[in-house]
Image: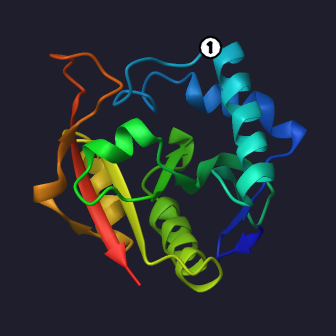
Amino acid sequence: MRIETDRLVLRPWQESDRAPLASVLGDPEVRRFYPTVLTVEQAGAQFDYALARQAEVGFHFGAAELKATGQFVGLIGLGYIPDETRAAIRGNPAIEIGWQFDRSVWGQGLAPEGARALLAYGFGTLGLDEIVAFTFRGNLPSQRVMEKAGMTRDPAADFEHPRLELGHPLRPHVVYRIAR
């Protein structure tokens, strides 16, 4: 999969993405709505997992780069929701969209631009019927991206993330949906 927007190239991972991905996933500000920042080793494991999922199912989260310069700016993509998380969300949705961008490019509208392109790809090329996005309820920047991409909040589907222990402050999640 390779998708071009006005300013982005969304593409599969390449080996040269390992270090910049580790930098993004190791940034405490980027990861402020996640339980932890990732170490270089953890980011490498996530990179390897993404490569395996891409090979297995044909799509997964991948790299985002600036079209004009080729600079790596983050990760974005569509992915199958893990069963445990899927079961916690009303309607048991199968596919999610998500992103994490380097903070040097925040506020430029790149995440919604990439998300709109991926939604079009998911509905057009992959023939998906529905795509969801979810995040910690306090992650207002990500929720704004979901809205700018055309997704609608589904309060009845909000859930407590099953991969976080009871009482964890990041456990409450909101759900946004969009259908073909």
Considering depth in this image, is 68 or 83 the residue closer to the camera? 83
Residue farthest toward the right in the current orientation of the protein: 15
Is residue 7 positioned above or below 173 on the image? below
What residue is rendered at 74% in x and 60% in y? 58
Is residue 147 depicted above or below 129 in this figure? Answer: above
Please, is residue 173 above or below residue 120 in the view? above
Observer able to see residue 112: yes
Residue 132 point in image, percent of width and height:
37, 61
The residue that mark 1 highlights is 39
Q: Measuring from the top left, give residue 45's x and y in whole percent.
A: 71, 24
Residue 150 seen in the current view: no
128 left or right of 92? right
Residue drawn at the location 56% of the way across and 19% of the way down? 38
Give the left or right position of residue 167, taking residue 54 as reference: left
Q: Residue at x 24, y 26 (%)?
A: 170
Q: Please state, as top left, top right, bottom left or bottom right, where the C terminus lies in the image.
A: bottom left
Q: Secondary structure at mark 1?
A: loop
Left or right of residue 75, residue 159 in this image? left
**Residue 9 location in percent, x, y?**
73, 65
Q: How is the image coloured?
A: rainbow
Identify the image quadrant of the N terminus. bottom right
Mark 1: few, some, or many residues within 10 Å (few <14, many ≥20)?
A: some
Q: Residue at x 57, y 21 (%)?
A: 26
In this rendered view, identify the residue nearer to me: 75 or 93: 93
Amino acid on which the number 1 mark rests in the picture:
Thr
